[in-house]
């Protein structure tokens, strides 16, 4: 079944010039890029995006990091797009969780500055797409 997912190439990915590398992996996998925008998130947008992590010890640092510079937001579409991108990304910790061959395992070391974000469920994807691309919101 075709799904859509919200992906961020985080500020570390832009600063390290991995936008092309990451989008290339997305396209080689067979996912379609149906929206793409570079922007700098303000605290309000970052806080809404990461609302589920409010109160976690890493939350303040996460908001500071995600608002620290330009990022790339994208909507990807394809069969099982949510799981497919999370497989490409690898686990949150690039060293202990991400499997070799994934974006995080191959290109990152840090559990916070881990290059990419991908929605974790259909509900999260729709919520996050509505935040980053309001013109694409459904319902
Ligand atoms: P992401 O997939 O965008 O979802 C939440 C983000 O919080 C995660 O990627 C990391 O950037 C960050 N994060 C999660 N766990 C930790 C942690 N233990 N320490 C620091 N940052 C974290």
Image: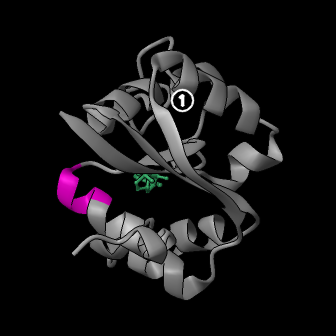
Name of the residue lying farthest toward the bottom: 44
129 left or right of 125?
A: right
Name the residue nearer the viewer: 79 or 49. 79
Residue at the image point whose x is 49% and y is 69% from the top:
133
Examine the structure image and report whether residue 131 is included in the region drawn in magenta.
no
Residue at the image point whose x is 53% and y is 22% from the top:
105
Q: Report whether the residue tagged 1 is closer than 8 Å to ligand 1.
A: no
Residue at the image point whose x is 34% and y is 28% from the top:
84
Find disc 1 in the rendering and name its residue.
104
Image quadrant containing the N terminus: top left
Quadrant position of residue 31: top left
Name the residue nearer the viewer: 106 or 40. 40
In the image, is residue 92 above or below residue 69? above
* Residue 1 seen in this snapshot: yes
Looking at the rendering, the stretch of residues picked out in magenta corresponds to 121-125
x and y percentages locating residue 95 in the rendered image: 49, 25
* Residue 108 seen in this snapshot: no
x and y percentages locating residue 139 in the rendered image: 21, 75
The residue carrying pointer 1 sits among few (fewer than 14), some (14 to 19) or many (20 or more) residues within 10 Å by Cα, namely many
């Amino acid at each position: 079944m075709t799904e859509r997912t919200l992906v961020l190439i985080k500020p570390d990915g832009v600063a390290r010039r991995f936008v092309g590398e990451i989008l290339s992996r997305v396209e080689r996998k067979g996912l379609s890029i149906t929206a793409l925008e570079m922007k700098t998130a303000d605290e309000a947008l970052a806080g809404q995006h990461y609302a589920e992590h409010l109160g976690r010890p890493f939350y303040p640092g996460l908001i500071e990091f995600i608002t620290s510079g330009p990022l790339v937001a994208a909507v990807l579409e394809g069969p099982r797009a949510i799981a497919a991108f999370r497989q490409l990304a690898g686990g949150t910790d690039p060293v202990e969780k991400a499997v070799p061959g994934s974006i995080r395992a191959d290109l990152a070391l840090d559990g916070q500055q881990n290059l990419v974000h991908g929605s974790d469920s259909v509900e999260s994807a729709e919520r996050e797409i509505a935040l980053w691309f309001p013109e694409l919101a459904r319902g």
